Every structure is written in structure tokens, then in C-alpha cells.
Image (spheres, rainbow, N blue to C red):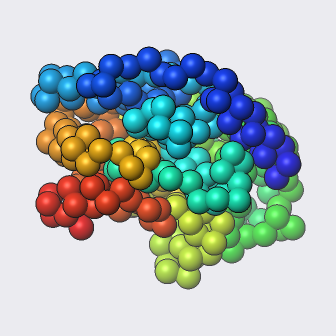
Amino acid sequence: MRFKGLVWAGAFLAAAALPAVARAADVVTIGTAQPGTITNSAGSALAKVMKEKRNIEVRVQPFAGSGPLLALVQQGKLDLAIVNVFEMAQAMNGEPPFEGKAPDLRVVSSLFQSYVGFLVPKDSPIKTLPEIAGKNIPSGFSAAPIIEPMRKAIFANAGVTDAQVKLVPVPNSVRSADLMQQGRLDIAFLSIGSGKVNEVDAAMGGIRFLSMSDAPKDVEAMRKIMPQASVVALKAAPNLAGIADGTKVMGYDFVLVANKSAKPAMIKDAIDVLAQNRAELGAAVPQFKTATNAQMAGVPNMPYHPAALDALKALGAR
């Protein structure tokens, strides 16, 4: 926890040292991660469509990580930010720079979901998640620390403990896939639909994602570790290598975040644009096409902005 605290504290100091984000009174600012990331692509798509449909000027401000984004939203120097829900949860749980006080951060909407899971070679004898007991499993994820609690949450869902497997430290999910290809790991951990999945699928003559359990007790066990996670059943699709109809994986939201004092009109405009323009948004980020009004309103265990609740209720989403 000390390492994570230092990271957040550093993010807060970096945000404090930044000049106020330059903007006119009628310009909405959206903070995202750096260009090339899904959050930057999503922010750029939303900015473009808000200009086209509502004549609202939106300026996308990229940053190196979620810490500066959320600190600047807290300080009122950014209107909106796009982060994954686990990053939002870290802030809401009082991790630095919000230690000792409840942040003034609120969800505006879920934008779309992302999916992750464990995969094996197509011809692997491992057919179910509980069968990973005794196998070589990636762990640690030192360069991407948010993955380690994801791994533990999936283990909890499967009723598997760390003592039952052989944990192999890896820096990130891509390395876990490389080691599986080399035969040094029995399974890998990847984002479903990612380019690395397609690469491994082609190189190994096929892969399979292992299905999670959606039994209430198993979902509850997962949420004790990752309260904002869900178990989602996917359908087979040409762009989803390793997914058969009904494969259940971990889903989590990318969310649009504002300060609790953000102007209600801005919040309503953002929600209306998201709900009414999925085709246009999806042309830039395909995940937008899969979103629904109910999903926009359904981020688990997170506080929503009051104006967002009103707008989503008007859409019939709550």
C-alpha cells in the first residue's frame, strides 16, 4: 500500500503544480490518459459528437495517469475525466491524495464495459477455472498493479486459493501471454478483444477463455475483492478470439466522472449525447456501440452526480 500511496501522492503534487487548465467559460474540459489509449479515444469521440450535435466546445486534456485527472476534477480545474471504475474506487476509498476525506467525485455515466479473463491454449486439458489448481499461474503484475486484485477476484470466484497454484511473477498481462506461448505458464491473463489475444490465437492455433461462475455466492466472493466488477456472459464474435457463446468473464466500466458541484446542464448534455449518438461514437470507439441506457446507470457501488440520476431517470434507465 505504501508504493500505491506514493504514486497517488506524487500524482496530487503533479496536479497541484500544473497551471490551471486553460479554457474559456463556455468550453468543457475532459481529462483522459495519453493519446493512443482507449480513454483518450473515447474523450476525443465524445468531444467531436458534442460539438456536432450540441455545438458545445469540448477540449480533451491528456495526462500520464489517473491521479492527476481525478485530483484536477476534485480541484475544479477539469470539468470531466474518463477513468476505469477501479481507479475511481481507489479514490473513493480514501487513497492518497484523498486520504482522510471523502472526495467530491461523482460518476456521470458508464461509457462502456471492458472485459478480462484467463485464457489457455485451445488444446489445453484445463476446461474450467477450478482446474487451474496445481498449475503455473501469472501473478504480481508489477507494471500494472490493478491486475493483481483482478486476478485474486477471479480466483475467489472460482474458489481457488493462492496456496493451490504455483504463482509466477510477471510485469504485465502481455508478458503472461508470452510465457504461456513459451510453455512456462499454463494460462495467461488478457483483455478480451485486444490485439495481443489475436496474436496469441494465431500463433498457438487457437485459444480459449475460461468461463467464470455467475452463481450469486461466487459473484459475492469476487466483489469482496473488486466491488465494482461483474460477471458478464459474452457471445461469440469474429473480433473476440477465444470466446464461445456464453463464456462468462469479468466486466468493468470505464466511467465519465465529474465533481459533485458540476453544472447540471453540462451533465445532462453529456448523458443525452451518449444515449442518442452511439453509432457516431462507435465509429471511433467500437465499445460505445454495445452500451445501453441501463448500463450507463448501472455502475455498482459508486455514487452518481444528482443531475446524472435525474437525466438517467428521464431516459428510463433507473
Q: How many marks?
A: 0
Q: Choose top left, top right, bottom left or bottom right for residue 112.
A: top left
Residue drawn at 15 percent across, 24 percent down: 55
Residue 30 rendering spot, x and y as whole percentages: 40, 30
Assign the C terminus to one quadrant of the image.
bottom left
- Pick the front one: 222 or 97: 97
90 to 280, vertically: above or below:
below
Residue 246 found in image quarter? bottom left
Q: Is residue 53 above or below residue 272?
A: above
In the picture as drawn, the residue positioned furthest to the bottom comes out as 217
* Most foreground residue, 208 or 60: 60
Instruction: Name above or below for residue 262 compared with residue 234.
Output: above
What residue is shown at x 47% (from left), y 62% (from top)? 302
Determine whether 77 is above or below 213 in the image: above
Residue 141 visible: no
Left or right? Give the position of 257 relative to 94: left
Q: Is residue 220 visible?
A: yes
Is 83 displayed left or right of 123 in the figure? Answer: left
* Identity of the residue drawn at 41% across and 45% down: 258
